[in-house]
Image (cartoon, rainbow, N blue to C red):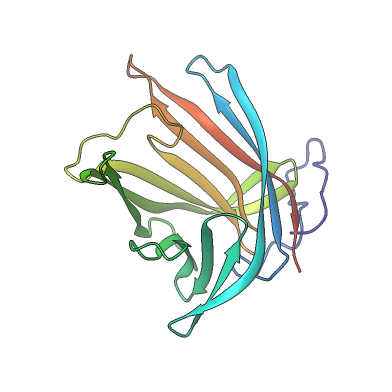
Amino acid sequence: MGALTAIGCGDNTPTGPTNQGPIMPLAIGNTWAAKNTLFAADGTVESINYDTLVVRGTEVIDGETWYTTNSEMMYALRPDGFWGWEHHSAAGPTLGGIYPASVNAAFSERIIRATDMAGNMVDSVRADAVVGSTNVTVATPAGIYSCIQYKTRYRYMDGRSFTGDFYFDGDEVNYAAPGIWFVKSEAFRKSPTGAIYLRHRSELTAVTLK
């Protein structure tokens, strides 16, 4: 992603770096900087932090090139979209975003297996995603982008609603701009009273593409 781009007032024309290309551009040195905000049920801000994902190298696994990062995740592009893999995890790679995308196209994003302190599996959560739109204009501190909207629904394997104490418990809406990758992500949670509220928001603040 390119240099930080200011958002113009009253103009929803995309202003970020070139908004085309693979859903996740992968090259050593690419960086994505983000602002992460955690909200309480009443809408007040609980915390704000910033992080940066950096592509640091490559690794060939079974003839496929994976791009390693400064996190535990590595990524690869395949004909159906971008894939993520927690470094050499036995769970294997998961499809992070289908691309090319069409409205209502569905895919199983991942299965999260919960274990107890002894490492015994106690439950499993399935994340099912669907394409909500292929042309949503999204404003971020890094610019305004034309995005694909991915909606992810977390549910226990037996169909029960997935709620809990962490920001990612509940449903998510992610926005990915082709040629840029994710520019905005929002996670929702159900309160004890049953109200749905925004729990976490991540927004792109700057991007550098090699």
Is residue 122 left or right of 173 when viewed as pictured? left
Query: Percent from the top left, x then y, of residue 171?
Result: 39, 38
The residue that appears at 48% across and 68% down in the rendered structure is 81
The residue that appears at 42% across and 31% down in the rendered structure is 166
Placement of 76 over or under 104, stated as above or below = below
Placement of 66 over or under 84, stated as above or below = below
Nearer the observer, 174 or 157: 157
The residue that appears at 44% across and 71% down in the rendered structure is 80
Q: Residue furthest front?
A: 118
Query: Percent from the top left, x then y, of residue 104?
Result: 38, 55
> What is the quadrant of the C terminus in the image?
bottom right
> What is the quadrant of the N terminus in the image?
bottom right
Numbered circles on residues, count: 0
Query: Percent from the top left, x then y, of residue 39?
Result: 54, 23
Q: Residue furthest left?
A: 158
The residue that appears at 32% across and 19% down in the rendered structure is 194
Nearer the observer, 117 or 129: 117
Query: Percent from the top left, x then y, of residue 169?
Result: 38, 34
- Which of the 4 image quarters holds residue 93? bottom left
Is residue 172 left or right of 21 when viewed as pictured? left
Is residue 168 left or right of 186 when viewed as pictured? left
